[in-house]
Every structure is written in structure tokens, then in C-alpha cells.
Image: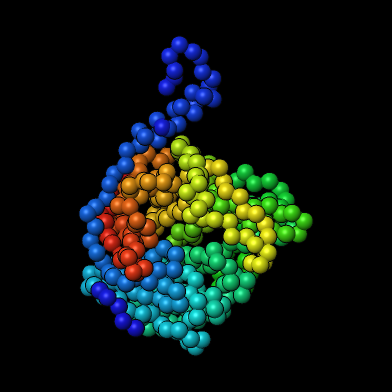
Amino acid sequence: MGFNLAIRPRGRLVSSAALLSALVPAMVRAQAATRLGPPTVVALEVPYAGQAFGELKDGRLLVLGVGEVIIIDPAAGTKRELGRQGEGPGEYRQPAAARVLQDGRMVVLDRGTARLTTWHPDGGLDTTVSVPVFAALNFAVDLDAQGRVYWGDIPPEGRQFLGPGDRAGRHADSTWIYRLKPPGRAFDTVASIVHRSAAWIGSVYRLPVRFGAHDEWGALPDGSLWIARAGQNRVDRKAPDGPWRLGAPLAWRPVRTTRADERRIPDLSTPERGDSTFHPMARVKPPFDYAIADDAGEVWTHVVQPNGYTQELFAVFPAFGASTSRMALPKGRRIVRLSAAWVYALVEDADGGWTLERYSRPAIR
């Protein structure tokens, strides 16, 4: 395989609700953004399948593409494939998640073979263990640095959620997060999230509204969980086996959906497609559409802005304390890794390929 390198009107009274509504935009505007840059190009033609990148102790990056696993060395300017396509030892069919373990080894969860494969830092094959198919097949999966597997799934009837604010019984638009430590087969529930705006009608699960709010989540190296709650625009955290620590909500300016949004993301539901359910357009967009965390637990959420925006904005939620800052990147960038010193972002070129850029990161507070 080849690679290239947010005022009170005068003369009349206003209600407290109206006053608060007027103040929210001002609160948001007062949070100045720090623009990062200039960037350094790290690699060209980088594979990308939607997941965040991992990072080895020596600074090399662990990258998942569609059907491939790549190691990028920013210092040397090189890329190489880890393992290969197939079903034998050291092979995979649909890699779904990757993590660098505490001891420096690399582990990849393969959806296609329902296996966890571990490699040494030099790329040599270490071990392969199987995982339950129902865990590997989920599209929302993550790993921690102990090799534990986390995945999201719709809960069964008659159970209760564990997350803060959840009520007993089935919640139609929520997902449980499960945890398993291979090679064992026993698993437990560690959290729940709102992952889509949906409803159960009879026995049919209706698909989401367009631009519906959904929570983002992930596992930190030590097994702590973070959940970016779209309904409250906050980040909650949970120690591996400890209590919840709820984050402080951050005020935001709601962005209304427009006709342009409807044209850009039309409702394609038809009986011919096997789905005749109308997917309505949300009236307002959520405060963020994706989030990413560093290994210390600081979370950056990608701020949803009105059409015509000129730069990418990120609200910073530190591991402790309220969000007090925002960061900005040039338009078109998507962050795929936050390290202690760097921000790694991808930008798509005219031919559909991805270029990996690196930005100096402000000091972690």
C-alpha cells in the first residue's frame, strides 16, 4: 500500500425570562476564542473512518481507516500499515476502535472477526482474544488503556438507567453504555446517554429528527467516562467505579434550522427504502455536533454555528471547573487528537483525501 507524504429596552419592563434570553447571547459573545495556528502539515492522504486518533508514548499516531490500521510518525514523516486485511492472526476485516495500552502496546477491536488484537510498540504481533459478537458489532464502541471494551446499545425492557437524571424504565431516546474486560465474558452497565431524538411507537423504533440533539461520550485511559450532554451543554464525568461528577452548563446561542439546511439534508424516507417514517427537521440545532477529549479528561465540543460561519469554534470543558474558554481553527478542520502539546486536525482536499495538520496547543490549565 502506498502513501503520500449573545438589553433591556428603554421605557418598558421586561420579564425575567426575557431578560435571561437577552443575556445568554451576551454571555456567549463574552467568551473570546483563541485562534490556533499556523499549522504544520504532518501527513497527506490520511485514512479516516470517523474515530479519534490514538497516540503512542513516542508521539506516533494510531489511525483507523476503513478496513485498515495505520501508524503515522509525525517526526519522521512516515506512515505504515499495522497488520493487514484478513481473518488470521494479526489480521482484521472491519477495525472499529483502537487504543494504546498502559504498557505501550496497541490494541484494535475488529468488528468483522469479533476480536481484540494486540501489537507490540514495534508492530510485532502479541495476542488475539475473542469478544462477544454483540459488543463488537455495535457502532458506538471505545477502549481504555487497560483493554476494557465499552459499547452503547438500546437497553432491554424493565431495567433502570444508571446515569444522573435518568428515570426508571425504558427511555425511548437513550442508550446504555456497557463495559467488558476481555478475555472474560461478563459485562456491566456504567452510564446512559441520549443518543438521538426518537420514539417507540408500538414495537417500531422511529428514526431520529434531522439535527436532533445527541450526547457524545468516550472512555479515558484509566476507564473514567466523559459524557457531553447536548440538552444541557455540559460535560459529566464518572470515575471507573466511582460516583458521577456533574459539569456546569455552558450558555449558548441556539441556532435555528433553515431552508438551506433542509435542502442540504433532505428527508429521504420512502417505502421503497424500507422506511416510510417522516423524519422532521429540528427547530433549532444542538449546541455541538461532536466532541473530543484528551487523556487528562479535558473535553472540547465543536460549537454549532449559523450557516456562513468563517471558523471552527470549540468550547473547552476542563477536567475540573466550568468552561471558560473557546478555541478556533480555520474552517473545514476536524479535530482528531488532543495531546498535551498538540492539536491534530484533518482537512479534506478537493479530491476527497485527508490532510493531517498539527497546531500548537495552549497550556493545559
Residue 273 vertical position relative to residue 169 in the rendered view, above or below: below
The reply to whether residue 228 is in sight is: no
Residue 234 vertical position relative to residue 130 in the rendered view, above or below: above
**Does residue 282 appear to the left or right of 287 in the view shown?**
right
Q: How many marks?
A: 0
Q: Nearer the viewer, residue 270 or 128?
A: 270
Q: Quadrant of residue 241?
A: bottom right
Which quarter shows the N terminus?
A: bottom left
Residue 318 vertical position relative to residue 113 in the rendered view, above or below: above
Residue 71 vertical position relative to residue 236 in the rendered view, above or below: below
Which residue is located at x 49 percent, y 28 percent? 21
Q: Quadrant of residue 100?
A: bottom left
**Does residue 238 appear to the left or right of 120 in the view shown?**
right
**Does residue 215 appear to the left or right of 345 in the view shown?**
right
Q: Nearer the viewer, residue 311 or 287?
A: 311
Q: In x, y percent, where is residue 94?
A: 50, 76
Q: Nearer the viewer, residue 107 or 249?
A: 249
Q: In x, y percent, where is residue 298?
A: 40, 50
Which residue is located at x 47 percent, y 49 percent? 260
**Does residue 173 appear to the left or right of 86 in the view shown?**
right
Which residue is located at x 35 percent, y 50 percent? 312
Which residue is located at x 44 percent, y 61 percent? 221
